Image (cartoon, rainbow, N blue to C red):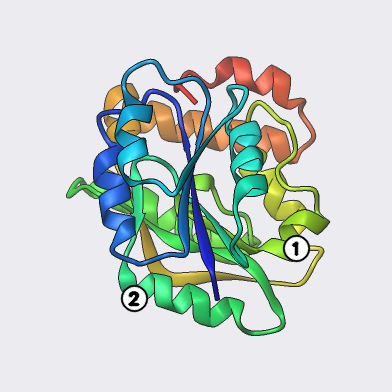
Amino acid sequence: MRVSIIIPTLNEAQVIEKTIDRIARLAPHEIVVGDGGSQDGTLDIARKYASRIVTAPRGRAAQMNAAAQAATGDALVFLHADSAVEPAGYAKMIEALRRGNIVGGAFSLRIESDKLSLNLISTLATWRAKRLHLAYGDQAIFVRRDVFGRIGGFSPLPICEDLDFFRKLRKEGDIVVLDEKAITSPRRWLKEGVFFTTFRNAIIAGLFLLGCPPKFLSKWYLSVR
C-alpha cells in the first residue's frame, strides 16, 4: 500500500525538520507539504526533504485538501507539523487499512511531556476518540484515498474541520482508533496554559457538535493555524 503523509504548515521552521526526519524513517511512498504562506523559512527546509510542496490559501482544511489532491498514495495520513507516528503504529495503520471494512481512523494521543495534567489530557482524548469515533487532527488522521474523495475531503471550515471530517467518515464504513500513539508537541498547552487550552477546546468542540457556526467559534480559537 502506497502511503502519502500530508503535513499542513504555516511558519513551522522550528519544528518541520525534526518532523520530516522522523516520518521519513517510516519510508512512506511520499511526504507532501501543504503550505499556507509561510514566511519564516519553512519552505526552504521542507524542500530539502519533502517529495513535493503545494501552496494553498491559508487554512488547515484548504491546505490539506490541496496537498491531498497532489498526493498519489492509496492511503492519506494527515500529520500536524509538530507531531509524529512511531514505526509500530504506522505498520498497524497499514494493516488496518488493508481490511476491506476499515475506511480510516486515527491514533491514540500522546502529548510529549512528563506533566501529569498533559498525560491525563492524552488519556481523555483517546477515550473520547474511541468512544465517539471523533478524533482531533493531532491524532494523525488516516483515510483510504478513494473514501477521501467520496466524502469531498475536508469541508472548508475555519475550525473543527477534523471533527466534521469524522462525522462524514463514520457514514462510509468502520473507523478504527489504534492503541498505538500519535506523538504531539506540548507547545500549544504550555504557551496558552493547560487549563485554558483544554477548557477552550472542549467548549468549542461541544458547541460545534451542537450546531454552532464554525465562523463564530473560530473567533475564540487563539492558536495560530
- Residue 150 placement (x, y as % from top left): 82, 58
Give the CA separation, mark 2 to mark 1. 24 Å
Closer-to-camera residue (153/68): 68
Placement of 224 over or under 146, stated as above or below: above
Closer-to-camera residue (217/175): 175
Quadrant of res 25: bottom left
Quick one: label 1, few (<14), some, or many (20+) residues within 10 Å?
some
* Residue at the image position 52 percent from the left and 65 percent from the top: 3
Placement of 127 over or under 180, stated as above or below: above
- Residue 29 placement (x, y as % from top left): 47, 64
> Badges 2 and 1: C-beta atoms under 8 Å apart?
no
Q: SS for tag 1?
A: helix
* Residue at the image position 75 percent from the left and 63 percent from the top: 147
* Residue at the image position 44 percent from the left and 26 percent from the top: 10
Is 80 left, or right, of 145 in this rendering?
Answer: left
- Residue 157 placement (x, y as % from top left): 71, 30
Question: Residue flagged by tag 1: what amino acid is it?
Answer: Val
- Residue 99 placement (x, y as % from top left): 64, 84
- Ranked by sequence position, the earlier of labels 2 and 1 is 2
Quadrant of res 215: top right
Q: Which mark is residue 157?
A: none
* Residue at the image position 65 percent from the left and 32 percent from the top: 62
Q: Which mark is residue 88?
A: 2
Question: Residue flagged by tag 2: what amino acid is it?
Answer: Ala
Instruction: State the quadrant of the N terminus.
Output: bottom right
Can residue 12 be seen in the rendering of this structure? no
Quick one: label 2, few (<14), some, or many (20+) residues within 10 Å?
few
Q: SS for tag 2?
A: helix
Q: Which residue carries the number 1 mark?
A: 147
Is 139 left, or right, of 25 in this rendering?
Answer: right
